[in-house]
Amino acid sequence: MTCKNFGSCGSCGLYQQSYEEQLSYKEKKVSNYLAPFYDKTLEIFDSPHSHYRARAEFRIWHEGEICSYAMGNLAKNGAVTIEECPKVIGAIEKRMWRVLDKINASSKVLGERLFGVEFLATTTDECLITMLYHKKLDEEWMKEAKTLENELACKILGRSRKQKIVLSDEFVTEKLTIDGKVFTYVQFESGFTQPNPSVNVKMIEWAIKQAKKVAKGDFLESYCGLGNFTLPLSHYFENVLATEISKRSIQAAQRNCDLNDIENISFVRLASEEMTEALSGKREFNRLKDIDLSTYNFSIVLVDPPRAGLDEGTIELISDIDHIIYISCNPETLARDLQILTKTHQVIEAALFDQFPHTEHVESGVFLAKKV
């Protein structure tokens, strides 16, 4: 990928390396963290070099009556306006510049006190555009935004302090072919989604490959989000219990379950710590009143925690389960957690998923089995 903003925009810090050099650098980084626990070669899943990102956020820079997109600069001490962003997928790229053209050419209403624009798109060309304001949005704004929505064949949502205006929908619908099956995912504006659809599919299929080695008993998942892993993996187990703290994500997950005609998953809004308390019998939750936890026989658990990694209670809980799939966005905290998990389990497989080309960020995964 080439970009006019390399060297000034802080979004892509590895711009001086070829993509092959980036992958080699990330492989060494993750391998070093995993070295005490895994001595085999990492399985590497690469990304398209450009047009890979389905979620993007841009600041709005005002100079007189002209609005431009801006990102944090490379020095991390300010912002820089950008002329292009070749990392976003086509559904975003073909609309983002037309938004600015409309604002700058004919719509002061849309540009006035606009401070940010967020894009959420799909591989099937759906696009949701969220416009962020430091002003109250009125009927005139809604009229102008609706015209733009129709012109761009997209969905537009306006946000201001204590105000959210949804002109049509507040979600997009993605369809991904995973392990030979098509899965439908509703993705809401304020919910977490995996940013790189191509690598996301590879990541899920890697998890399925590990799950097939077990393919019996029940499946437990923590940090399930909108059901990204849950739906495809549910086909290989009797019953599934999946937990997530975000109310919006749970709503999306339940809707996605219905859209895909899957009936063996129970989604519950619980934090990871609450899940641990519930399954260990330390605390009862009204949210679990219709679920008999004693009927589950978990043979495998999947965790996909934030950068901080797992809490001690969750580590203790999953240490009693025979198989663990751990998806990590931070190899440092993954290595920290493995220091405890490998007391009871051994790492059987490990992989690197390049969700974020041209940046320092890297996703990785390990599959662990209980020691005999």
Image (cartoon, grey):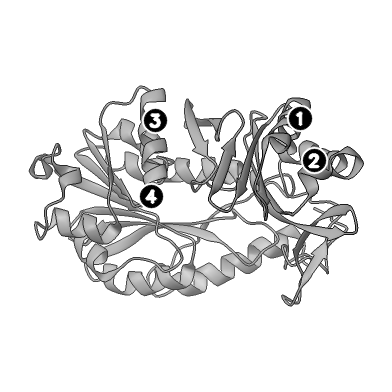
In the figure, residue 231 lies in which quadrant?
top left
Give the CA distance from mark 4 to mark 3.
Answer: 14 Å
- Location of mark 3 (residue): 255
Q: Residue at x 36, y 52 (%)?
A: 223
Do residues under tags 2 and 1 come within 8 Å of each other at their CB atoms? yes
Q: Name which residue type carries label 3.
A: Arg
User: Residue at label 4?
Assistant: 246
The count of marks equals 4
| First along the sequence among labels 4 and 3 | 4
Label 1 Cα crowd, 10 Å radius (few <14 / some 14-19 / many 20+): some
Please name whichever residue, 88 or 39, is drawn nearer the observer in this view of the structure: 88
Name the amino acid type tagged 1.
Leu
Q: Is residue 342 visible?
A: no
Residue 64: x and y, percent?
90, 58
| Measured Cα–Cα span from mark 3 to mark 2 | 31 Å
Q: Which residue is mark 2?
A: 99
| Residue located 42% across and 71% down the image | 333
Asked which quadrant contains residue 294, the reply is top left
Q: Residues within 10 Å of mark 3 (few under 14, many from 20)?
A: some
Let me know if residue 223 appears in the view: yes
Distance from disc 3 to disc 1, alpha carbons, whole Å, reads: 27 Å
Q: Earlier in the sequence, mark 2 or mark 1?
A: 2
Residue designated by label 1:
152
